[in-house]
Image (cartoon, rainbow, N blue to C red):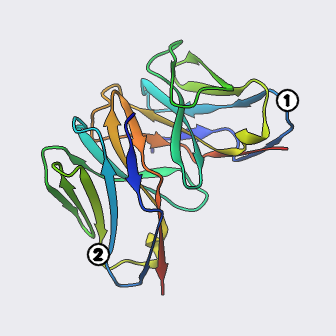
Amino acid sequence: DVKVTQSSRYLVKRTGEKVFLECVQDMDHENMFWYRQDPGLGLRLIYFSYDVKMKEKGDIPEGYSVSREKKERFSLILESASTNQTSMYLCASSLEAVYSNYGYTFGSGTRLTVV
Amino acid sequence: GEDVEQSLFLSVREGDSSVINCTYTDSSSTYLYWYKQEPGAGLQLLTYIFSNMDMKQDQRLTVLLNKKDKHLSLRIADTQTGDSAIYFCAESYTGKLIFGQGTTLQVKP
């Protein structure tokens, strides 16, 4: 069964900490995405990557960065965590042909609380 | 920018049909998707429809697409308590998926 694995289900961090959220996929997908999910706002795209070492800003990249050194791993970095970054973070991956009936495969999410 | 809109909440009784509606803005979307999110989980692809189709049926699920009005709906027949979840519609736009806010479906026994 194909999988997108996010390293932590729950995280609690302090304001100002540097936070790493890890995502690994085993499907040899080219595309990987980071979203945050907030009630009433749906999923908002933070960053995405179409290939190793490539990254593109999504709709809300401020306060975040990403790293993709290997095809299977896509990391989201909060340079200096703030309370307004408390959220559910979802990683997803997809085949190169984005306009396909496969859509995205999602991880289970990381619920991050910044105190 | 591109936008996908959904109502936030729907409550139905077990055994009834549920209809979840969605409007989108990008008329060039090739595929439109419905995802389901159960409590504490990520999103699962439920079904999809290609933009040249009007309807797609998959067991208890029926997807209707009105391209003229940019309206997408998901009908769940004989709704069960296990269908309680958040349902997201999504359109494909410039290589990315744009999601709606999600509709929370509550199924009462």
Q: Position of residue B54 (x, y in %)?
A: 13, 54
Q: Residue at x 47, y 73 (%)?
A: B82
Q: Quadrant of residue A100?
A: top left
Tag 2 subunit: B
Q: Residue at x 43, y 26 (%)?
A: A31
Q: Position of residue B106 (x, y in %)?
A: 49, 74
Q: Which residue is mark 2?
A: B77
Side (left or right) of B99 relative to A107: left
Side (left or right) of A94 relative to A12: left
Q: Nearer the viewer, residue B6 or B39?
A: B6
Q: Are marks 1 and 2 on the same chain?
A: no
Q: Position of residue A63 (x, y in %)?
A: 69, 26
Q: Secondary structure at mark 1?
A: loop
Q: Residue at x 60, y 33 (%)?
A: A23
The residue type indicated by label 1 comes to Gly
The residue type indicated by label 2 comes to Ala
Q: Local crowd at mark 1 within 10 Å, few (<14), some, or many (≥20)?
A: some
In this view, the residue farthest toward the bottom is B109
Q: Residue at x 58, y 62 (%)?
A: B39
Q: Which residue is mark 1?
A: A16
Q: Secondary structure at mark 2?
A: loop
Q: Nearer the viewer, residue A43 or B81?
A: A43
Side (left or right) of B31 relative to A58: left
Q: Quadrant of residue B83?
A: bottom left
Q: Local crowd at mark 2 within 10 Å, few (<14), some, or many (≥20)?
A: some
Q: Position of residue B60 (x, y in %)?
A: 27, 70
A57 w.r.t. B12: above or below: above
Q: Distance from label 1 to label 2 (Cα)?
A: 49 Å
